[in-house]
Amino acid sequence: MNDQASRLVDRPKPRLPRGLFDCTGKTLAIQQRLIGKLAEVYASYGFELLATPCIEFADALGKFLPDQDRPHEGVFSFADDDGQWLVLRYDLTAPLARYVAENYDSLALPYRRFQVGPIFRDEKPGPGRFREFIQFDADTVGAASMAADAEFCMLLADSLEALGLSRGDYVIKINNRKVLNGVLELIGIPDGAQGDAARLGVLRAMDKLDRLGIEGVAQLLGSGRKDESGDFTRGAGLAKSAIDRVLGFLQAAGGDRRAVCATLAELARGSEIGEQGAAELLEIDTILTAAGFALDRVRVDPAVVRGLAYYTGPVFEAELTFDIRGDDGRPIRFGSIGGGGRYDNLVERFLGTKVPASGVSIGVSRLASALEMSGLLSEKAVVGPVVVLVLDRDQMPRYQGMVSELRGAGIRAELYLGDGGMRAQLRYADKRGAPAVVIEGSNERATGIVTLKDMALGAERSGTIKSRAEWTKGDASQISVKRDELVRNVRAVLARSRA
């Protein structure tokens, strides 16, 4: 094999692992707009911003601890030079618990923070399920009152409406893990460490109700389920009578919140923890009603269980209910785009004392996709930079001066830095989504003018021109302006493009 062939064989193939994706400028711009709106709402509720690292010690993740010589499945992990297991954070909640424990004496409690950042899950990818995605969290640590949990339901509702959703386009669903634990206790699964494995299996099965339906959940509660690809998921191993009781709990939802609370109290009768959970739901309903959050915004739904094991009380989810159709015309169901709950044991793991906490998380990427497809966050609203073309290479400093002048006036602008001619530069500006280009050749320079091309108007006009003769009559998308009036005229073009 010659050297050239050897080099070809050694070349790495450009590819991404499954469940990961690249984000382009327009997608990121849409996400940033969403994040900005969420941040305004979260800040208006009194939460302050925090950032924690993407890497934590494995034992900081609570239930996701090393199993002998390796961390639990579902977490990306590696060992450091000291042989200690490190992990990419599975969520933003466990790192918060670690932060609060480290700084407990200096924090003003209750501590209220919000945070946005990527999280990582080593799970089987699928439609809408990724191994890396952005979450936007808010948490209150140090408040045992159910008012904190009710507030997160309000926060979710207000956030979605701030993004342009109307009543009826979403619903916030709330449940209580204590009620579920009471039902599990009544079917023979004990509370505490001895029942953790069985309880987690049941919770994860129940959490898949929206995706798999009652039949699929029943299989996961029993011996297990084989999916369409042939992969088998081991079930929780419950007896038929226990499965029937759990399924009955899942289907106990109704209209009126107080009526559902009464039904859940009856289902949990005989379990102290279950009856306590039903009473807490009733307290949350009272607070929501007083704050004006009616059934069209927040409902009690026993099917909300949340998959993570650390929740100890109320749990809630935000679900989109409006129809979204893909490019093929088929409906796309986004379902849950966020949720959270109460986790009173996470900080206690570090400090040894009870520190109540509750929080909520929104999946930014998922929500952005839904809003973009519905037209509420359109990429058309994301305007590219004004591009200054380079017709004479020896005038590069002059062209750069124009770019700096535009930037100084608060206009996004860039200088073309490639090697192409004018047509190639215009094609480049079109791909960049430029609203306008600035053109100055020797003739313009001699007369103290520049040419502005409105790219959107040019594209619109090009579709109506039928002949070369019509084209030569003049291009209405191009205007000549005085060089010293460049900024004012560019602003006029930008105003038309945003209209």
Image (spheres, rainbow, N blue to C red):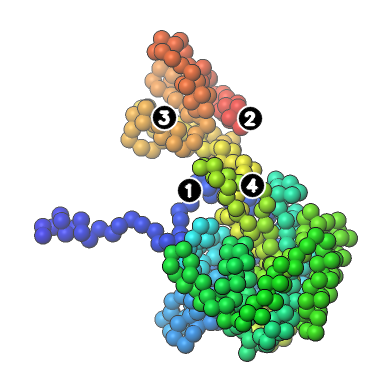
Q: Describe the element under mark 4 as helix, strand or loop.
A: loop
Labels 4 and 3: the sequence-earlier one: 4
Q: Are marks 1 and 4 in contact (CB under 8 Å)?
A: no
Instruction: Residue 145: name its quadrant.
Output: bottom right
The Cα–Cα distance between marks 4 and 2, rounded to whole angstroms, is: 28 Å
Mark 4 = which residue? 323
Residue 499 badge: 2
Labels 2 and 1: the sequence-earlier one: 1
The residue shown at (54%, 26%) is 486
Labels 4 and 2: the sequence-earlier one: 4
Going by the numbered disc 4, the residue's amino acid type is Asp
The Cα–Cα distance between marks 1 and 3, rounded to whole angstroms, is: 21 Å
The residue shown at (52%, 75%) is 224
Mark 3 = which residue? 426
Count up the numbered dots: 4
Residue 24 badge: 1
Instruction: Residue 348: name its quadrant.
Output: bottom right
